[in-house]
Amino acid sequence: MKTTFLGMAALAAIIAVPSLSLAATFAYVNQAGEVMTTEAATPSAAIMTAPNIGTHSGVMLINSSTDSEVVGDRVNGV
């Protein structure tokens, strides 16, 4: 009985704790020339999973609110 109670308490604690996300936000330029964002654990994963990423686009780690000012801008020549 005591083991069951402890097991149920441990399960409740695991469910109650919000899951930790190791993903970071990256900015990239899509094929239409718009700066977009994607979330990934690494820059390589961001490049692989960014929807409609431009052929010559890389990714930029978004660290703060000032970095996110570029999101939504247009890049000419894409």
Image: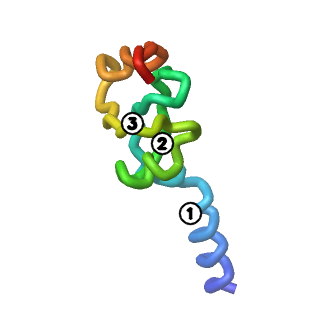
Check the image and tell me how it is coloured.
rainbow
Name the residue: 32% across, 36% down: 61
**What is the secondary structure assignment of the residue under circle 1?**
helix
Give the residue at mark 2: 39
**Please, is residue 40 above or below residue 72 in the view?**
below
**Please, is residue 37 above or below residue 48 in the view?**
above
> Mark 2 or mark 3, which has the lower sequence index?
2
Q: CA distance from mark 2 to mark 3?
A: 16 Å
**What is the secondary structure assignment of the residue under circle 2?**
strand
| Dots 2, 3 in contact, CB < 8 A | no
Observer-nearest of 42 and 58: 58
Give the residue at mark 3: 57
> Mark 2 or mark 1, which has the lower sequence index?
1
Name the residue: 46% across, 53% down: 20
**What is the secondary structure assignment of the residue under circle 3?**
loop
**Please, is residue 11 above or below residue 26 in the view?**
below
Observer-nearest of 18 and 38: 38
Characterize the local packing of mark 2: few (<14), some (14-19) or many (20 or more) Cα atoms within 10 angstroms.
some
Question: What is the x, y in percent for residue 68?
Answer: 38, 21
Characterize the local packing of mark 1: few (<14), some (14-19) or many (20 or more) Cα atoms within 10 angstroms.
few
Name the residue: 44% across, 20% down: 71
Residue type at numbered disc 2 = Glu
Observer-nearest of 74 and 26: 74
Q: CA distance from mark 2 to mark 1?
A: 24 Å
Give the residue at mark 1: 14
Q: Is residue 51 left or right of residue 60?
A: right
Residue type at numbered disc 3 = Ser
Characterize the local packing of mark 3: few (<14), some (14-19) or many (20 or more) Cα atoms within 10 angstroms.
some
Q: Nearer the viewer, mark 1 or mark 3?
A: 3
